[in-house]
Image (tube, rainbow, N blue to C red):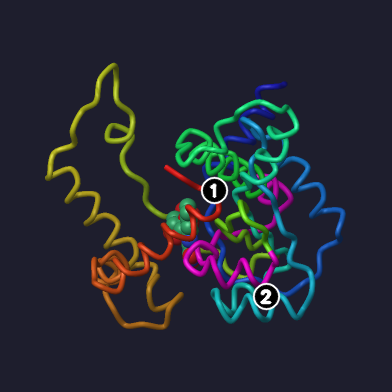
């Protein structure tokens, strides 16, 4: 591979941003197949994921009711990415030995399934970017897992994780901040960042999001970014109840830690 080509992949990665406004344009099926084909090339343990290509207008509309309406309605390609321990379970059954997925706890396989799905998602996003398309991933499938399961008739052991929305860019947002390298990259041993460093990052984030008008632009709400994050992560009785229900759902679907 030439140096120039390698640099172009790095430039692509350095300039990727989530796109939440799409121009509703139809994209050929071949593109979707190509994206998923390259998604499959991601490093993987046992390809413990499945992808539902949401094609029908009826399903898109029902999905838009649960997830971010405008994004889902205008995206040209919608892929529901699921962790899939069911297929692995069935394959191991065929080997006729006492296998780990029959047990009450299999943390490694559960985590690996999520890893597998995430790496595939990233491949798909980057491949879409290389074709000049924009994308965003949404977490609503896991938040509304039982409803999504019903809508797409997911069998036991197949858990909806995320939605990839891909399309023709209808906006050109700025790059969003990332933690400084010296907070993420540790040399030989873990270095605890100071409170000062963490506060500095929160302040950078807040300043950027205010400059971008992020919350107002995407939610229509007039709240400061930090208050938006606090509201999203607040521990309430309701969140505790939702988390208990989600843990129960995950365990019933083979995702057991
Ligand atoms: C697991 C996961 C779930 C996400 N869910 C949502 C979501 O529900 N809605 C949304 O607008 N963005 C979602 N995002 C995108 C992030 O908000 C986005 O990546 C982040 O704001 C950084 O912006 P950037 O991708 O433009 O750098 C999600 C990202 C990840 C990794």
Position of 114 relative to 3 (above/below) = below
* Residue 198 image position (x, y, % from top left): 19, 46
- Mark 2: few, some, or many residues within 10 Å (few <14, many ≥20)? many
Q: Residue 254 carries which label?
A: 1
Q: Please give the name of the residue rendered at 69% of the width and 73% of the height, measured from the top-left corner.
A: 23
- The foreground one among 190 and 206 is 190
Question: Does 72 appear in magenta?
Answer: no
**Which span is picked out in magenta?**
126-153
The quarter of the rendered structure image containing the C terminus is: top left
**Considering the numbered disc 2 on the image, is that residue within a helix, a strand or a loop?**
helix
| Placement of 88 over or under 62, stated as above or below | above
Question: From this viewpoint, is residue 174 visible?
Answer: no
Residue 210 placed where, x, y %?
31, 69
Residue occupying the point 72% across, 59% down: 52
Q: What element carries label 1?
A: loop
The disc label shown at residue 151, or none: none
Residue in the image at 50% along x and 62% along y = 142
- The question of residue 152 being in magenta is answered with yes
Q: Is residue 225 above or below residue 253?
A: below
Residue for badge 2: 74
Residue 122 or residue 160, whichever sits in front: 160
């Amino acid at each position: 591979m030439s140096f120039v080509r390698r640099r172009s992949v790095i430039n692509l990665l350095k300039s990727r941003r989530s796109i939440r406004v799409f121009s509703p344009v139809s994209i050929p099926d071949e593109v979707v197949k190509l994206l998923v084909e390259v998604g499959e090339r991601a490093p993987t343990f046992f390809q413990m994921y499945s992808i539902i290509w949401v094609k029908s207008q009826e399903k898109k509309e029902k999905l838009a009711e649960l997830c971010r309406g405008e994004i889902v309605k205008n995206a040209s390609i919608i892929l529901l990415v699921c962790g899939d321990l069911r297929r692995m379970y069935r394959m191991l059954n065929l080997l006729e030995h006492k296998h780990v997925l029959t047990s009450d706890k299999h943390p490694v396989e559960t985590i690996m399934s999520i890893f597998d799905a995430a790496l595939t998602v990233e491949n798909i996003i980057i491949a879409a970017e290389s074709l000049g398309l924009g994308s965003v991933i949404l977490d609503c499938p896991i938040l509304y897992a039982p409803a999504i399961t019903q809508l797409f008739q997911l069998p036991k052991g197949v858990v909806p994780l995320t939605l990839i929305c891909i399309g023709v860019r209808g906006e050109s947002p700025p790059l969003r901040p990332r933690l400084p390298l010296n907070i993420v990259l540790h040399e030989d041993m873990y270095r605890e960042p100071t409170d000062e460093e963490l506060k500095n990052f929160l302040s950078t984030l807040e300043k950027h999001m205010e400059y971008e008008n992020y919350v107002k632009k995407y939610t229509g709400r007039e709240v400061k970014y930090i208050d938006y994050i606090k509201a999203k992560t607040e521990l309430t009785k309701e969140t505790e109840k939702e988390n208990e229900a989600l843990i129960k759902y995950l365990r019933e679907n083979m995702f057991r830690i």
